[in-house]
Amino acid sequence: MRVAVIGSGSWGTTFAKILADAGSEVTMWARRDELAREIRETGRNSDYLPGINLPGSLHATSSLADALDGAEQVYLAVPSQTLRSNLEQIKDQLSGKIVVSLMKGVESGTGLRMSEVIAEAGAVPADKIAVVSGPNLALEIAREQPTAAVASSVNKDTAAAVARAATTPYFKTFVNFDVVGTEFGGVLKNLIAVAVGIADGVGYGENTKASIITRGLAEISAFAAAFGAEAQTMSGLAGLGDLIATCESPLSRNNTAGRLLGQGYRLEDVVRRMNQTAEGLQAVTPVLELAKSKGVSMPIVLQVGQVLEGTLDPAELAPHLATDSDEPEGE
């Protein structure tokens, strides 16, 4: 099977490797021609996956048309805030194809999940859209350390087709049909990972970080449920699994961004120091707007937003984990 991967960052390249190792012929689109050339000529992406040899069945191009030509499935791994503009360039070539989101973001301004942007801007029917999420730190997977993910779609055949295409001896893809929960799990855990990173950067220990993770899971589960997600999704790979991996690993971009904030760097300095997008930084505002629309309280995410704005000292985030009330509350 021929598949296309649009985006050549660490996750796009890693997922292209998974697809190729699973038996597909993969063409990956890179925005920069010099990166596409490096991948073609050396079988490596030294910018984002140093030291990783890519399969021979993985090709790279800087031409969107060439990447999509003949592909049965299209995997999107671009920064969430650029998805709409990318779709406008390729929507005429998506007809009849399964389109898969590898992204974990919410569109600023609209509050739309990535699958909703694909449906709207790409004119792709819902039964042809899938999302993939889970505890998926790119470099570990590129090194073929075993892990798992979930492919979710409203159509069971679509979810199953993606799972088959993305299963190797080191990467197992399960299926579910809770697209809302799967997507929000991937988005919301980034925000908690930023909070954990801030606590780490300040110098707080494991108790503080464990408290943020635990209360954070309750917070994001309540948010997701308000939008129709299933509870079991938030305790599965796309929820708790992704949350643990992202909060605990120095490979996590969102954890790293939070740690820099906790060390006293301003937001603009953090963005400048990161060589890839930390989606959690951009998702705070639209997530808080969505939470407000449903009357959901998200104190941890709110405080992350205040740190980003410079109105809250990072060292003050942890003592206010759940509430300012002195009244006893249930866990």
Image (cartoon, helix red, strand yellow):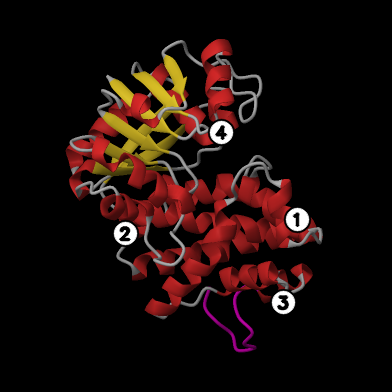
Q: How far, Cα to Cα, is label 2 from label 4? A: 30 Å
Amino acid type at mark 1 = Asp
Quickly name the residue at label 1. 269
Q: Residues within 10 Å of mark 4 (few under 14, many from 20)?
A: many
Mark 2 against mark 4, which lies toward the viewer? Answer: 4
Residue 230's place in the image compared with 246, above or below, is below
In the rendered structure, which disc, 2 or 3, sits on the residue that comes first in sequence? Answer: 2
Quickly name the residue at label 3. 311
Q: Nearer the viewer, residue 173 or 166?
A: 166
Q: Residue at x 58, y 73 (%)?
A: 302
Q: Residue at x 41, y 81 (%)?
A: 295
In percent of width and height, residue 21 lies at: 42, 17
Q: Which element type, helix, strand or loop, lies under badge 2? A: loop
The span shown in magenta is 321-331
In percent of width and height, residue 254 lies at: 62, 51
Q: Residues within 10 Å of mark 2 (few under 14, many from 20)?
A: some
Q: Which element type, helix, strand or loop, lies under badge 3? A: loop
Mark 1 against mark 4, which lies toward the viewer? Answer: 1
Q: How far, Cα to Cα, is label 1 from label 3? A: 16 Å
In the rendered structure, which disc, 4 or 3, sits on the residue that comes first in sequence? Answer: 4
Quickly name the residue at label 4. 10
